[in-house]
């Protein structure tokens, strides 16, 4: 069923740390979300050179793959702040449009919570979930994230219009490398 470094969902989706060979698929999925302009604050796609540095520069980057080894989605995890707030993590998730609705996002979020615990974070906070991103908001709330409030007009769409953003948080449990195999059991 997976080990402390890998997690499997329903036998069909495995979440694991990325390897260099995953970078083209990761870049494609990331850029798909950036181009849609519905979720990430980035406006420009990642080039191949930027992607390698970007994913390597995170505290943790993991991919979700199917049984055939196709990358379906990814997450990046990093500190949300520094110093006295450095125990708060932030994460971003990207799922290929073709893989949505198959539990990939849930597997990625669960794994990111585990990875945050392994890294010593105490909280996972989302700073900018567009209010009309109903699928993400439903998933986060289903997985126990608490909404913190709304920032009016906090997200600018590609067409220049603004929508509110919601902030969320979730406590992170400390995890040891020799702890339970994964949070997806």
Image (cartoon, helix red, strand yellow):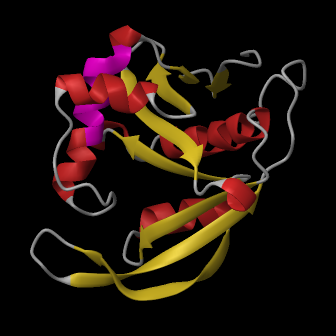
Magenta range is 22-30
Residue 185 seen: no
| Nearer the observer, 135 or 25 | 25
Q: From the image, give the main secondary structure of the stretch colored magenta.
A: helix
Residue at the bottom extreme, as displayed: 152
The reply to whether residue 167 is in sight is yes
Residue 27 located within the stretch drawn in magenta: yes
Q: Residue furthest front?
A: 83
Horizontal arrangement in the rendering, residue 142 relative to residue 49 (left or right): right
x 54%, y 67%: residue:
138
Residue that sits furthest to the left in the current view = 159
Q: Residue at x 85, y 34 (%)?
A: 175
Out of 51 and 3, give the one closest to the viewer.
51
Q: Quadrant of residue 15?
A: top right
Percent of width and height locating residue 145: 68, 65
Q: Position of residue 9 (x, y in %)?
A: 63, 29
Give the x, y percent position of residue 121: 75, 46
| Residue shown at the point (26%, 55%) measured from the top left | 42
135 above or below 62? below
**Considering only vertical position in the picture, is 50 above or below 83?**
above
Number of numbered discs overlaid on the protein picture: 0
The magenta stretch spans residue 139: no
Q: Residue at x 40, y 29 (%)?
A: 55
Quadrant location, the N terminus? top right
Q: Is residue 14 found left or right of 176 in the rendered image?
A: left
In the rendered image of this protein, does residue 171 appear above or below residue 11?
below
Q: Which percent across, then down, holds residue 26?
A: 33, 28
Quadrant housing the C terminus: top right
């Amino acid at each position: 069923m997976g080990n402390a470094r890998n997690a499997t969902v329903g036998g069909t989706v495995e979440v694991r740390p990325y390897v260099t060979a995953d970078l083209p698929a990761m870049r494609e999925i990331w850029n798909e979300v950036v181009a849609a302009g519905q979720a990430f604050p980035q406006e420009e796609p990642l080039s191949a050179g930027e992607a390698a540095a970007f994913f390597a520069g995170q505290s943790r980057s993991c991919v979700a793959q199917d049984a055939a080894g196709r990358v379906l989605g990814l997450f990046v995890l990093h500190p949300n702040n520094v110093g006295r707030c450095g125990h708060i993590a932030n994460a971003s998730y990207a799922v290929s449009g073709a893989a949505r609705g198959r539990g990939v996002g849930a597997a990625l979020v669960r794994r990111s919570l585990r990875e945050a615990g392994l890294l010593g974070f105490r909280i996972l906070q989302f700073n900018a979930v567009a209010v009309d991103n109903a699928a993400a908001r439903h998933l986060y709330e289903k997985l126990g994230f608490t909404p913190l409030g709304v920032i009016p007009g906090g997200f600018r769409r590609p067409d220049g219009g603004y929508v509110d953003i919601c902030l969320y948080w979730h406590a992170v449990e400390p995890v040891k490398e020799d702890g339970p195999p994964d949070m997806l059991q």
